[in-house]
Image (cartoon, coloured by chain):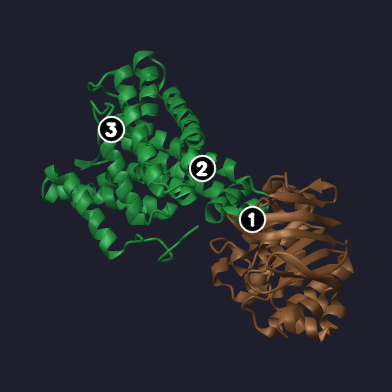
Amino acid sequence: MLELDRVVTTYGAVRALDEVSLAVPDGEITAVLGANGAGKTTLLRSINGLVRPASGSITYAGHDLITSRIEEVVTYGVAHVPDGRGVITELTVEENLRLGALWRKNREETTASLAAMYAMFPPLDERRSKVADTLSGGERQMLAIGRALMSRPTLLLLDEPSLGLAPRITAQIMATLRRLRDEQGLTVVLVEQNARSALSVADSAVVLNLGRVVVQGAAAELAGDAKLRHAYLGF
Amino acid sequence: MTPVNLIIYGMANGTIYGAVALALVLIWRSTRIVNFAQGGMLMFTTFIAWELVERHHQSYWLGLVVAIAAGLVLGAVVERLLVRPVENGPPLNAVIVTLGLLLALEAVAGMIWGNGLSSYPPEFSLNFYHVGHQVIYLSPNFLFIVIAALAVMVALYLLFQRTSLGLRMRSSAFNPEVARLLGVRVGRMLTLGWALAAGVGALAGVLIAGTEPNYMNPNGFDGLLILGFTAAVIGGLDSPVGAVVGGLVVGVALQLLDNYVSGDIDFFFVFALLVVVLMVRPNGLFSRRSVRRV
């Protein structure tokens, strides 16, 4: 279980996260919603150590993430999918994927994971030795997710996977997340501006506004609450 | 000199410039710093080898190995102690630090070994080969230089392209934040990058020091740095292959100039070449993209 307790993260005088508390149950998809600047990306960056909270605690599976080195977080089973730009464009598709499994230092597992990723994302299979720079937006997103899965994580953090993608591709990605949860029991934290598609796969959801948690509940409930949707989710 | 000989001789020299350029490129692409101290670092490691070979009568090979080892250590120490603190500051800070290190190394070398000229004993003959009555402008020493430099370049290529360590190093250079999230110890990779670069530089230093008498002097390698830098810029600063090709271009161009125009305007010509390349192709002949920010 991923637990955040009264996390405060500041950028200078700005409180990007203001006493955020959150429990992400294992094996579920938790959507983190909210407008631009609500603190969604800061939340992910606080979890994986790219920014250090000023106070509060973040733990996952018994590990204190706030005092961990960034490089260690992946070894606890936490994998991060940055937005589309997080693919290393100078490296080939296969090199990007291999990078995800490097810390495991296990050749056979890496080979098996590679085969699994190519089976899951056939377009990547066709472009194995192509530089990632040549991929389309959707393919980059697949590569970013595939690379994260190469580390065989138990918790997947996704930062706006639908950003800049066509609705059909977004739907495919959401279906992939649902399958990973159902088949492998993967825990997912899904940060999204596209609330409608995120709520379609999420079990529960959190709405952030100006760094504070304003609503928390089952995804179906949030999706059914018209007032809430208009106030914070824009649909 | 026949044109063929000019090209052979130029390319032999060019492989050394290419090695220096490669050292600069390795550092530039991982830390976005032009290591102006490279000339001083390779001067210093070459003097260490010279001390062993000339003064203590050790073998050429021991000298070469010690120089490269000293380069690896020096590179790592410089990155950790001097560069790391200014790495995230304004680029000018790093420029000043590397320039300061260059001056410091030259001053210290002068205190230890004096500021006079001395010769580095080559392992192989400097006499050119003959084919029948025809002279080929290639000596056993130059043949060795070409082979040694190319061997190191191929080894580095294999390291970067074929090993997981190389993949770690490249990912750290291209996108340190993402590399870190994937569990790569980026700091170690940068240290290793500086060490490897300084090791390649050290090799180039020993190789060029034996090419002519009286090469050894604390300031004697400044020209080599300028030629290496020009080669690196021609190659685009980002491209290891470009660095090597840039070195060959500079080597051959200088020989053609010496032969057909004058040997006295070498450095004027090199600077002119640098300016022209920067005007026509500011990103070098080998860079793939116009702007790259890490």
Disc 1/disc 3 C-alpha distance (Å):
60 Å
Q: Which corner quadrant of the image does residue A195 belong to?
A: bottom right
Q: Is residue B43 shown to the viewer in this render?
A: yes
What residue is shown at x 63% (from left), y 69% (from top)? A37
Query: In the image, which disc is placed on residue B193?
Result: 2
Q: Residues within 10 Å of mark 3 (few under 14, many from 20)?
A: many
Instruction: Give the chain of mark 3.
Output: B
What residue is shown at x 34% (from left), y 23% (from top)? B108
Instruction: Give the chain of mark 1.
Output: A
Residue B169 higher or lower than B45, as above or below: below
Q: Residue furthest top?
A: B56
Q: Which corner quadrant of the image does residue A170 belong to?
A: bottom right
State the residue position of label 3. Answer: B211
Q: Residue furthest front?
A: A13
Q: Nearer the viewer, mark 1 or mark 3?
A: 1
Instruction: Give the chain of mark 2.
Output: B
Disc 3/disc 2 C-alpha distance (Å):
28 Å
Residue B22 position, x and y percent, is: 41, 46
At mark 1, the secondary structure is: strand
Q: Is residue B5 left or right of residue B259?
A: right
Residue B199 higher or lower than A202, as above or below: above
Query: In the image, which disc is placed on residue A195?
Result: none
At mark 3, the secondary structure is: loop
Along the line of sight, the residue nearer the viewer: A44 or A166? A44
